[in-house]
Amino acid sequence: MRFFTYQGKGNISGDRIRELRQKARLSQSALAAQMQVRGVMIDQDAISRIERGARIVTDYELRTIAKLFDTSTDWIVGADK
C-alpha cells in the first residue's frame, strides 16, 4: 500500500475539521455517527486519524463533512485564502 503525504501529513484538512467539530460541540464518535447516518461508513478512530493528519480524507467524506457543518469544501481544505 502506498502512503501519500503533503508536508508530512496525510491531509491538509484535519485541523479545520477538528475546529468545526469542536465548535459544534460534537465528539469524534458523534461526528462519525452523523456521517454514518448520511451513508459514510467511518468510525471514531478514523476521525481521530483525520484530525491528526495521519489519514487521507476521501472526496465523499470531505463533501459529507462540508454539508454536515454547512460550509464549503474550499474552506475545509484552506482554498478560501
Image (cartoon, helix red, strand yellow):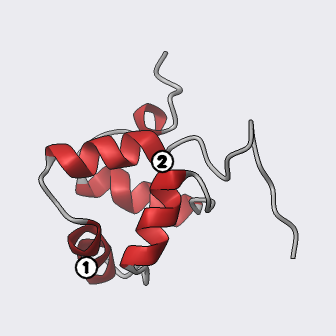
Please give left or right for residue 12 compared with residue 29 in the image.
right
Assess disc 1: are there few (<14), some (14-19) or many (≥20) residues with their C-alpha within 10 Å of its C-alpha: some
Image coordinates for residue 59, horizontal then vertical, percent: 57, 59
Please give left or right for residue 8 compared with residue 12 in the image.
right
> Which residue is situated farthest in the right direction here?
2
Assess disc 2: are there few (<14), some (14-19) or many (≥20) residues with their C-alpha within 10 Å of its C-alpha: many
> Which residue is situated farthest in the top direction here?
81
Please give left or right for residue 58 compared with residue 62 in the image.
right
Image coordinates for residue 8, horizontal then vertical, percent: 74, 43
The residue lying toward the viewer, choosing from 41 and 1, is 1
Spatial distance from mark 1 to mark 2, Cα to Cα?
18 Å
> Which residue is situated farthest in the left direction here?
25
At label 1, the amino acid type is Ala
Say which of marks 1 and 2 sits in front: 2
Which disc number belongs to residue 33?
1
Image coordinates for residue 48, horizontal then vertical, percent: 43, 64
The residue located at (59%, 63%) in the rendering is 58
Image coordinates for residue 4, horizontal then vertical, percent: 80, 55
The residue lying toward the viewer, choosing from 29 and 77, is 29
The residue located at (36%, 82%) in the rendering is 39
Q: Quadrant of the N terminus?
A: bottom right
Which disc number belongs to residue 14?
2
The residue located at (25%, 82%) in the rendering is 37
At label 2, the amino acid type is Gly
The residue located at (37%, 62%) in the rendering is 64
Q: Secondary structure at mark 1?
A: helix
